[in-house]
Image (spheres, rainbow, N blue to C red):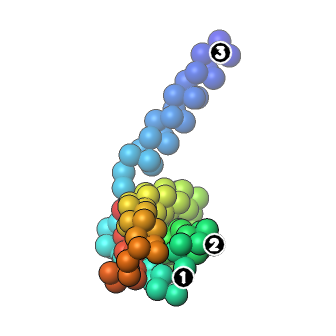
Amino acid sequence: MTRSIKILAALAAAVATTGTVAFPAYAAETGKTSSVRYADLNLASAQGAASLKKRVARAAREVCTFHGDRSLDGAIQAKACAKVAAAKAMPQVELALAKAGTELAENGRVTVAAH
C-alpha cells in the first residue's frame, strides 16, 4: 500500500511540474528584448568570449524576470525562460566568436529575447 501511495505521489508531482514546464514562461508575453553590446571586448581571447557569454546570460535573466512576482512558480518559470532565451542567443554569440580576429563585427551586439 505504501508503494502505491508513493507512485501516485510521484505521478501527481510529475503532472504538476509538467504543467509548469510545458507552457512558455509568462515573461514571453511581454515580448521583452535586450541588446548585449560587445564592441569593447576582445572576442579572440578566452576572457572576452567568457565575458560575452556572461553578459548574454545576465540579459536573459533580465528579460525573463517579472519584478512583481516573487512566488516559487514565478521563479521557476523565469529561470526556464532565461535558459531558453540564452540558448536562442547562442548562435549569434558563436557567430561573433567565429568572426573574432578575422573581420570587424557587423554591429557589435547580440539580441536576447524572452521566450
Q: Earlier in the sequence, mark 1 or mark 3?
A: 3
Mark 2 or mark 1, which is nearer the start of the sequence? 1
- Looking at the image, can residue 12 be seen? yes
Q: Amino acid at mark 1?
A: Leu
Where residue 93 appears, as percent x and y from the top left, is: 43, 67
Q: Is residue 12 above or below residue 6?
A: below
Residue located beneath label 2 in the image: 47
Mark 3: secondary structure: helix
What residue is drawn where x is 38% and y is 46%? 22
Residue bearing the label numbered 1: 41
Q: Residue furthest top?
A: 1
Q: Position of residue 94 (x, y in %)?
A: 43, 63
Residue at horizontal 57%, vertical 29%? 10
| Secondary structure category for the residue under label 1 | loop
Residue at coordinates 54% horizontally, 56% vertically from top-left?
76
The residues bearing labels 1 and 3 have C-alpha atoms spaced at a distance of 57 Å
Spatial distance from mark 1 to mark 2, Cα to Cα? 9 Å
Q: Is residue 82 left or right of residue 28?
A: right
Label 2 and label 3: CA atoms lie apart by: 52 Å
